[in-house]
Image (tube, rainbow, N blue to C red):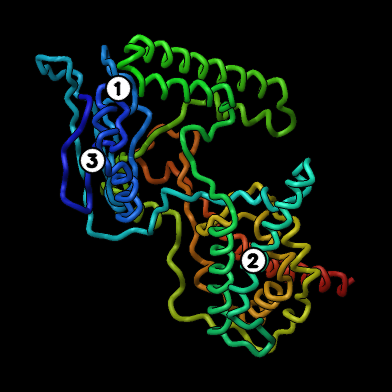
Amino acid sequence: MNRLTTALRRPSSLYPQRCCDHPEKTQDCADNKNLTFWERLITEEDLFVRNTEEVMRMGPGAMNHCIIDLTLSSPNMDLIWCLLVEEATGSDHEVIAWEVLGNSHPTAIMSTETTGWDISGWDPAKESEEEEKKKAEERQRKARECYLAGAGRTPILSDDSTKEEVREAAGSLREAMTVTLDEHVRKKRWCSRSKPWWCEDLKELRKDLGRARRKWRVAGILRVKAARREFRRAIRKAKRDCWNRFQQEADGNKVWTAAAYTTPQIDKTGQALVREDGSIAEGHHEREQAILQSHFLPGPPGVFEPAQGGKAFERVDAQLVGSLLGVAANTSAPGDDWISAGIVKVFWQWDKQRITQLVRACIRLGFHPGIWKMAKGVVIPKPGKPDYSKVRSYRVISLLDVISKLLERTAAHLIADHFISKKFENF
C-alpha cells in the first residue's frame, strides 16, 4: 500500500505525509500552496511521529520507497501495526492491520522536537578564524545578558528564605536557563542522520537523490533508481567503515561497547507485560504503571519534617558546590529538562552566588523542590532473561536534572564528611 489515507478521531490521528516522497506525486505537492500544513499541525496539536524504519522500507516491486508516508498520533496513544503477508489482495498491494490501544489517562508531555542544545557556538576557543571568535564572544555575551535578566527577576536566597521561596527560585532558575538556550543556542534534534557513520559524502548523495526525484519527469525514473541505489550502497559502506574504525581505535572501556553492538537488540515496543501477580498489563499506561509498581516502593505515609538546628549548611559555599559540579561528566545523560552538565557549568560561571545559595537553602531546610524530583525513566531489558513478557525482566534507569543531582551530591558529601570526622575523633 503506497499511501494511507485513513483518518481517526482524536486523540489519535493517521495522516499521509504532506511533503510527498513519491515522484509521481511531486508535481501535485508543488502545486499546493499550503506546503507547511503538516509541520504546523504536528507542532500545534502536539502530535507524535510514529514512523519506523520498517514502515519506510521498500515495498516489493514498488517504484517508490515507502509503504506508509507518515503516521501521527497524540502522545498518550499506543499504535501497533503489522503486514498480513498471508492475505491475498489480488494486486500488488499489501494488507496492513492496525490496532489502536486508547486510554483516558493523560501522560507526561512528550517532546518530539528538542533533545538538547549545542553550546559550542559560545566557545571562542573552538574557532580558528579571528572573525568567528568575535562572533562566538558576541553570542556568549548576549546569552549571558538574557540569562541574568531572566534569573534576576527572582532575588538571590539567603539563610532566612522559606520553602516557598526556594520552590520559586528553583522554577525561576530552570525557566531562565531554558529561555536563554531556546533564544541563543542551536537546538539538537534526533533524526535518521544523527549517526556516527553519517558524513558529508552521504549528505551530497542524499541531495542528489532529492534532485533526481524532483526532476524525474525529465531525467526518467531510472535516474531516480540509480541515485537511490548509489545512496544505499554508500550508507552500507559508511556503516562498515565506521565499524572497522571503531574496532581499530577502541581501547579501555570502549572495547566492551562492542558487545552492545554485536548483541541482538530486543524490541519489545507494544508487548503486553505480565505483572508479578499474574495479571496482564496492556497499553502504554498499564505497562507504565506495572513497571512503576514493580520497581519503585511507595513512599512513607505522612509528611517528613527534618530536625531543626542543623549547622551542616554553613559548610556549603561556592568552592564546595563548584568542585562537586566540576566532577560531573559533560557527556552524562540529562534529565527531563534536557540541560546537560556542560551547559550548567557555563551558567555556573555566570551566576555562582545564586546557585550556591539555592543549594545551601535546600540543605538548611531539608527540602528538595518538587520540580527537581521529576525523573526521566529509561526502561531497558535485563540481558539473558528467558521471558521478556515478565515485568521483572526489565530495569529502570532514572535520569534526574543536573541541578537535582548536584543537590544530592552536596548532601552526600556533607554526610560522608561528618562520619569521616567522627571516625577520626574516636581514634
Identify residue for label 2. Answer: 408
Instruction: Give the residue at x 77% y 72%.
Output: 318
Displayed quadrant of residue 310:
bottom right
The earlier-in-sequence mark between 3 and 2 is: 3
Q: What residue did someone put label 1 on? A: 23
User: What residue sits right under mark 3 in the picture?
Assistant: 15
| Other residues around mark 2 within 10 Å, as few (<14) / some (14–19) / many (≥20) | some
Residue 297 rendering spot, x and y as whole percentages: 45, 62
Task: Identify which amino acid the numbered label 1 is placed on.
Answer: Pro
Is 19 located above or below residue 46 in the figure? above
Element carrying mark 1: helix
| Most foreground residue, 65 or 313 | 65
Residue 40 versus residue 257 in the image, above or below: below
Question: For this view, does 3 lie left or right of residue 176?
Answer: left
Mark 1 or 3, closer to the camera:
1
Residue extending furthest right? 427
Residue at 37% across, 15% down: 224
Amino acid tagged 3 = Tyr
Label 3 with label 2: CB-CB less than 8 Å: no
Q: Is residue 269 left or right of residue 425?
A: left
Q: Give the Cα distance between marks 2 and 1.
A: 56 Å
Quarter of the rendering containing residue 355: bottom right
For marks 3 and 2, give the one nearer the viewer: 3
